[in-house]
Amino acid sequence: MAAADGGVAVASRLLTADNVTTLLDSTEAFLFDCDGVIWKGETLIEGVPETLKMLRSRGKKIVFVTNNSTKSRRQYAKKFQTLGLSVSEEEIFCSSFAAAMYLKSKNFPPEKKVYVIGEEGILEELELAGFTGLGGPDDANKGVQLKPKFLFEHDKNVGAVVVGLDQYINYYKLQYGTLCIRENPGCLFIATNRDAVGHMTDLQEWPGAGCMVAAICGSTQKEPIVVGKPSTFMMEFLLERFQIDTSKMCMVGDRLDTDIMFGQNAGCKTLLVLSGVTSLSILHDSANNIHPDFYTSKVSDFLEFNKG
Amino acid sequence: MAAADGGVAVASRLLTADNVTTLLDSTEAFLFDCDGVIWKGETLIEGVPETLKMLRSRGKKIVFVTNNSTKSRRQYAKKFQTLGLSVSEEEIFCSSFAAAMYLKSKNFPPEKKVYVIGEEGILEELELAGFTGLGGPDDANKGVQLKPKFLFEHDKNVGAVVVGLDQYINYYKLQYGTLCIRENPGCLFIATNRDAVGHMTDLQEWPGAGCMVAAICGSTQKEPIVVGKPSTFMMEFLLERFQIDTSKMCMVGDRLDTDIMFGQNAGCKTLLVLSGVTSLSILHDSANNIHPDFYTSKVSDFLEFNKG
């Protein structure tokens, strides 16, 4: 469902007891963002387990689509379990997995290597997909000395640089990634996502993958291939697996420029929850031009409105 | 002298014995970039001392305009001395100095603080200008722990963030600068320059200030005020000091997108030297639309051509 109609933005509708039944009936699959929707940092958002249970009991397909690249699918399944939710790896689409799947979809030669500016999740997904990753946590404590006659060597066999959130970003990694992209012929520059900031802790926001990706754009003067939201790469991959028409999907998220745009780009219905980074005043600000079909305070409103 | 004439780019002319006399006669001040023009890393480029001597003996004003922010004017004068050149601090305009002068020109309140993502030179220039700098080398070894209930505190009294080349860039500094810009009302975001890469060592190029600046653009989604080349801030400042018409100045540099553009933006004559990052094939590439008035292999060609 498009947000614009003949050039005039369609206002988002508040989710109510009246329209929630229509939304539930017309949706076969719910795609959930995680941070700000399912949890905040390490804390589950109120009413999530009951809501997921209700949706599953009504036969809805459930998928989690997250831009956070620090974890692999396996690590995410574990996090869900720790929070008391039973979610299988197959239901999780994180951007670390998307990066590995992108390389697979492009028949990236397994004898080539992948340099990672990012964390453990990307390296684990690369390995599971049969690729050799370099960098990431291994290069966290490496420094450089800008001295005469010092030559920084990089692996000429690196055919892709994957950049995601990296809380151990340093000049060594920036130079390594930059050299590969500038000097290795045909080297791909892949961004897991470009989120400016994210709730890396429950109390505040921190620079997101968009910060590290921009740094590499700045040094290489190249633009990356983005595999996370709002790019539709994950959706294409998801559609291949689930064979559900996107008009029968509803993307539920807390960010306009990633989640809602992703849903709209793919032709899904979209529901903004106000339990994360977007407030009602941001949604209604005249500068905002991304309008979800529906908005509500939190996912458990599904239950609330569906009771009566 | 403009590079374009009625929309048609004017081809750059090779410096020759014929036109060098006209250039010398019509120029009162020569503005030199340093890296790739005067030196490469720690090595003086051949013929520089004799060329500067000849220009001085002919009464030409000499100024050094560099985007490198890691040193202060004092530290630059020392570097010139080490290389055997007698240059006074007054002749040096580095981007660390420009950042401090920009704050002064905007009457930045001295009771406010300045957070620095960059190196010693910026902090020294801030101090000399009467400002209080924070961060920089002091935060080189600081880390963060993304744990529940952890709150990263920043100084609410920071009124400007200055970003330059920082070989000790880390997530702590990125979060600090981001918080100041996003949360301190009216906080300025100043970039010393946006060079993508630079010859931090003689053997290869490394990510430049453009890398760190882009990182902060990525996390704040704001654009900086640039005080280094090609911005004309330094030129305005320089003109106030020297009272020479820009048409009687010649900017000599090795970079098209900073040096030559800076000269052209200011209305100077421009001379590209091929002793740095720009090759003849880059200059003549059809994708290049920055055309200096003249080009030559190195500054000492002034001497060579002026002999006969």
Image (spheres, coloured by chain):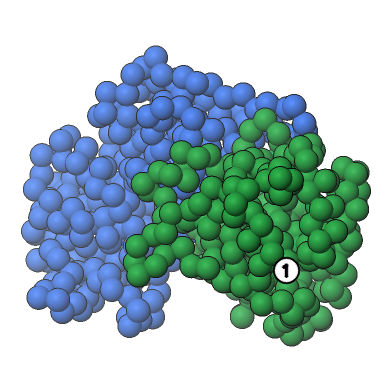
Chain colours: A blue, B green
- For the question of whether residue A18 can be seen, the reply is no
Q: Is there any visible trace of residue A241 in the rendered image?
A: yes
Which residue occupies 36% across, 17% down?
Answer: A110
Q: Nearer the viewer, residue B173 or A44?
A: B173
Q: What residue is at 25 percent from the left and 43 percent from the top?
A: A233
Q: Amino acid at mark 1?
A: Glu
Q: Quadrant of the C terminus of chain B?
A: top right
Callout 1 secondary element:
loop
Q: What number of labels is visible?
A: 1
Callout 1 crowding tier (Cα within 10 Å): few <14, some 14–19, many ≥20: many
**Residue labelled with disc 1:** B28
Residue A27 image position (x, y, % from top left): 12, 55
Task: Indicate the quadrant where residue B155 lies.
Answer: bottom right
A248 relative to B255 in the view: left or right: left
Which of the chains bears the disc numbered 1? B
Query: What residue is drawn where x is 61% and y is 28%?
Result: A138
